[in-house]
């Protein structure tokens, strides 16, 4: 046996160390967890998108649980110096927005349950609407009975303003259960509802506006602190709303602080000058304007006008018209050389309307104006003492003719407009 003298080589293992195996196992385990979590997230997202898709395809009125055209109160009213100031009804708006978001969140979470119970819910909703209509109808009947039993001073549904939308804090929002066909029914609902003194109704038929289908038959019940001085949010031929007020549910003592007592500032013709005229004529070279005097609005002013007639107080050209504003007024003075001017003022009993006559600038006269606006002058409030009204359309036509006379604005653009030549007139008894 011959030895070659070679050293024996050590044996080399081909197996991985135990620590490396553990590390690799942990690594692939983490990868597996990540893949599983991603799959679950994707599945949840897909399910959520499906729910949101179903939610977005609902009718907006169903989704929010409210009317498609909300009529939230935007403003209330408060007094400033005898007039009417506006303030934003922030509280009502914030509350409504909060409620809407709560409704939306609730609808998203429960959309599947409502889909399976839609038929049952529809039957229940119909029953609730029927019950609500029955209740409101009973309230209107009860209010009608109560009105018939009450004295003549009780508020009644009378004058209403078409193509006008009044402001107010919402007492009862319009819902399908409270929809009514006519403005008279809406007023009756307001009369029967505690706290309501302003009502707003929409009708395609009454407004003669087919485009008003979005609000047709809606009846909104509202409240203001002073229903004798409502403020219009919108008005005009394209406004589908009809509005009205009821003199109830307000602090009358606060509003009537400057009303005057019968026999002093207000009264009847029996309290005026004996034999004094009830109708007078403002006679001008452009035509005559007949005025119906209103002692129940302001008795001292009526007495003054009556004296101008009987004592020929406008003789000598002291009475004349000097200012005109298209769509607003014709203004003049009843200054007399022989009859002492009126010295008393009184808060106007209502918003001035087309044809009403009052003393200018909130004064006691003798400067006066005839209001010629198309809608009630809510921006003037009750700041003017009013004492008469043009008696007929012919008188209004004469007033408009005078407004169209030659005039100018000597102060420049957007300043008062004056007749180039003053127009003298006389005040005589109407024939």
Image: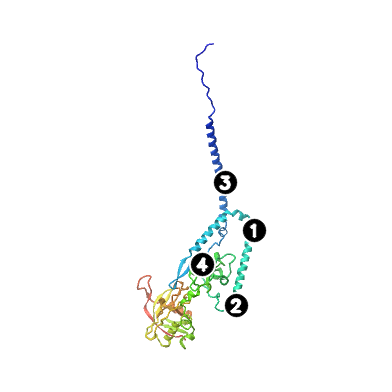
Which residue is disc 2 drawn over? 149
- Marked residue nearer the N-terminal end (3 or 2): 3
* Residue contact between numbered discs 1 and 2, judged by CB atoms under 8 Å: no
**Mark found first going from the N terminus, 1 or 2:** 1
- Report the Cα–Cα distance between label 2 and label 4: 30 Å
Q: In the image, which is nearer the foreground, mark 3 or mark 2?
A: 2
Residue 144 located left or right of residue 163: right
Disc nearer the start of the sequence (1/4): 1
Q: Which mark is residue 169?
A: 4
Is there any visible trace of residue 421 in the rendered image? Answer: yes
Q: Nearer the viewer, residue 4 or 317?
A: 4
Give the class, few, some or many, for how many residues have Cα within 10 Å of label 4's Cα (few <14, many ≥20). many
Look at 63% across and 63% down and name the residue there: 126
Tell me the quarter of the image containing the N terminus.
Answer: top right
What whole-number distance in Å separates the C-alpha atoms at marks 1 and 4? 35 Å
Q: Secondary structure at mark 2?
A: helix
Q: Earlier in the sequence, mark 3 or mark 1?
A: 3
Tag of residue 43? 3
- Which of labels 3 and 4 is toward the front? 4
Q: Position of residue 109 (x, y in %)?
A: 57, 53
Could you say where residue 255 lies in the image, as x and y percent from the top left? 48, 74
Q: Residues within 10 Å of mark 1 (few under 14, many from 20)?
A: few
Question: Which corner quadrant of the image does residue 382 belong to?
Answer: bottom left
Q: Which one is nearer the viewer's eye here, 179 or 347?
A: 347
Q: Which residue is mark 1?
A: 120
Disc with the residue nearer the chain's start (3 vs 4) = 3
Mark 1 residue element: helix
Label 3 residue SS: helix
| Alpha carbons under labels 3 and 1: distance apart | 31 Å
Is the residue 121 above or below the residue 367 in the image?
above
Name the N-terminal-most of marks 2 and 4: 2
């Amino acid at each position: 046996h011959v030895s070659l003298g070679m050293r024996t080589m050590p044996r080399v293992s081909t197996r991985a160390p135990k620590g490396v195996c553990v590390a690799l196992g942990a690594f692939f385990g983490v990868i597996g967890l990540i893949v599983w979590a991603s799959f679950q997230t994707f599945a949840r997202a897909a399910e959520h998108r499906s729910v949101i898709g179903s939610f977005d395809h609902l009718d907006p009125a169903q989704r929010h649980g409210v009317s498609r055209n909300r009529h939230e109160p935007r403003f209330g009213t408060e007094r400033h110096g005898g007039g009417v100031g506006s303030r934003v009804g922030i509280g009502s708006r914030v509350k409504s927005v909060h409620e809407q978001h709560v409704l939306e969140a609730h609808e998203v979470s429960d959309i599947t349950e409502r889909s399976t119970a839609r038929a049952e819910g529809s039957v229940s909703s119909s029953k609730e609407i029927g019950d609500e209509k029955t209740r409101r109808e009973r309230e209107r009947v009860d209010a009608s009975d109560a009105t018939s039993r009450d004295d003549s001073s009780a508020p009644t549904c009378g004058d209403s303003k078409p193509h006008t939308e009044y402001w107010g804090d919402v007492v009862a929002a319009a819902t399908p259960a409270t929809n009514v066909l006519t403005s008279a029914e809406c007023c009756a609902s307001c009369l029967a509802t505690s706290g309501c003194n302003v009502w707003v109704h929409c009708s395609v038929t009454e407004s003669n506006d087919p485009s008003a289908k979005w609000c047709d038959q809606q009846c909104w019940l509202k409240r203001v602190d002073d229903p004798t001085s409502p403020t219009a949010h919108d008005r005009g031929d394209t406004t589908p709303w009809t509005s009205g007020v009821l003199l109830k549910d307000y602090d009358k003592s606060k509003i009537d602080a400057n009303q005057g007592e019968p026999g002093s500032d207000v009264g009847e013709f029996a309290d005026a000058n004996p034999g004094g005229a009830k109708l007078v004529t403002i006679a001008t070279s452009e035509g005559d304007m007949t005025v119906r005097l209103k002692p129940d609005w302001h008795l001292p002013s009526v007495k003054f006008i009556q004296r101008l007639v009987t004592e020929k107080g406008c003789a000598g050209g002291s009475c004349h018209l000097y200012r005109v504003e298209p769509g607003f007024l014709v203004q003049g003075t009843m200054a007399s050389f022989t009859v002492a001017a009126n010295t008393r003022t009184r808060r106007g009993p209502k918003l001035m309307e087309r044809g009403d006559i009052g003393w200018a600038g909130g004064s006691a006269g003798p400067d006066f104006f005839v209001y010629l606006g198309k809608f009630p002058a809510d921006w003037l409030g009750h700041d003017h003492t009013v004492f008469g009204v043009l008696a007929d359309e012919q008188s209004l036509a004469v007033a408009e003719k005078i407004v169209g006379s030659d005039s100018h604005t000597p102060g420049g653009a957007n300043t008062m407009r004056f007749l180039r030549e003053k127009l003298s007139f006389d005040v005589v008894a109407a024939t």
